[in-house]
Image: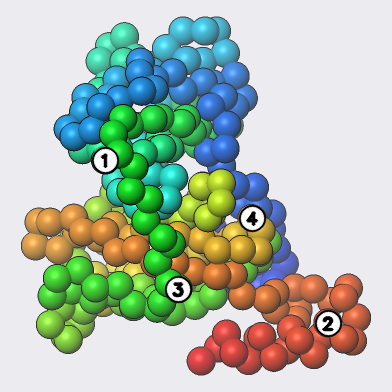
Amino acid sequence: MTNHHAAHAGHTDHSAHAGHGTQAGGLSVSEGGYTLELDATVLGAGPQTITFRVTGPDGHPVTEFVPEHEKELHFIAVRRDTSGFQHVHPVRDEKGVWTTELPLTPGDWRFFTDIHPAGHTGTLTLGADVAVAGAYDPRPLPEATGIARLGDYAVTLDGSLRAGEASELTLTVSRDGRPVTDLEPYLAAYGHLVALRVGDLGYLHVHPEGAPGDGVTAPGPEISFMAVAPSAGTYRLYLDFQHEGVVRTAEFTVRTAPKTADAAPEHGDHGHHGHHDAHAHAHH
C-alpha cells in the first residue's frame, strides 16, 4: 500500500499514478490473450446459476491466479442502467470452471471478471454482455448526491473524481447519526470500491488507502481511496463495507470535477483561472 501513500506525496507521483489508471477496463471480452467465456449469455429472471471460464493464450481454461484483495477472481454484475449491482466471489473447480449464484432482473446486463492470471504482468478486467428475459423496466440514473442511505446507515462521499488525475475519495460511514468506528476487514481493506463510467460501463481500478492491521488505518468511520477517472463524465460508485458481519453496498452518482491548475499548466492563463476556481471548490 505504500505506493498509494507515495502517490499522495507529490505531483510527480500523482501523474505517474494517474497514467496507470487512465484506461477504463472491462470494455472487452478478451484482452492480452485472456478471454471470458460464459456458458450462457441469455438467462431467465430470478435466481440463476452462472458458470464460466477464463481461457488463456493457449486456449485452455486458466487454473492459476494471483490473489488480489484476498480472492483469485472478483465477479461484478450490473444492469446496463447501472442498477442491480452485485459483487460476488465464484467458486472454481480444478478444470477452471467457475460457478456462482445471482438473482437477476429482466434487462441487459454486463458481467465483469477482475483477475490476475499467473504469469501475466498485472490485473485484467474482462466484460461480457448478458440478456435476461422478461419485461425490462429500466431505471433512470440516480441524481448526483454526496450521501447514500441504507436503512439506519448513511455513507457520505467527500473528494472529487478527476479525469486523468489521481484524487482521493473519502467515504464516511455512520449509523443512526453516529460514526461507525468498528468496521470489519473486507477483502483486505475496510471497504471495496468499484467505479463504472455511465454510458459504456467502463471499469475503474480504485485503490484503498492503507490496510487493516497496518498500525495506521482506523476501522472507520472514514474509508479512503485513490481513484483516476479515464475521462470527464458521469460515474457510478459502489462501496462494499462490512459491519456486524453483514456486507452492505452504498451507491453514488458522481460527475467529474475540472482538472486542478497544477495538473494542466499547458492550458495558459485563461485555463488557469478556471482551474484555480475548481481547485478552491474542491477543497471544502
Q: Residues within 10 Å of mark 2 (few under 14, many from 20)?
A: some
Residue 55 relative to residue 99: left or right? right
Task: Mark 1 vs mark 2: give the one in front.
Answer: 1
Disc with the residue nearer the chain's start (1 vs 3): 1
Q: Residues within 10 Å of mark 1 (few under 14, many from 20)?
A: many
- Pick the residue in front: 196 or 2: 196
The span from disc 1 to disc 2 (Cα, nearest Å) is 46 Å
Q: Amino acid at mark 1?
A: Thr
SS of the residue under disc 1: loop
Residue 116 visible (yes or no): no
The span from disc 3 to disc 2 (Cα, nearest Å) is 26 Å
Which residue, given by chain and number where applicable, does mark 2 sit on?
271
The span from disc 1 to disc 3 (Cα, nearest Å) is 24 Å
Which residue, given by chain and number where applicable, does mark 1 sit on?
105
SS of the residue under disc 3: loop
Q: Amino acid at mark 3?
A: Ala
Q: In the figure, residue 259 lies in which quadrant?
A: bottom right
Instruction: Tell me, for residue 230, which label it has, or none.
Output: 4
Vertical relation: 142 (above or below) 276:
above
Q: Amino acid at mark 4?
A: Pro
- Pick the residue in front: 166 or 3: 166
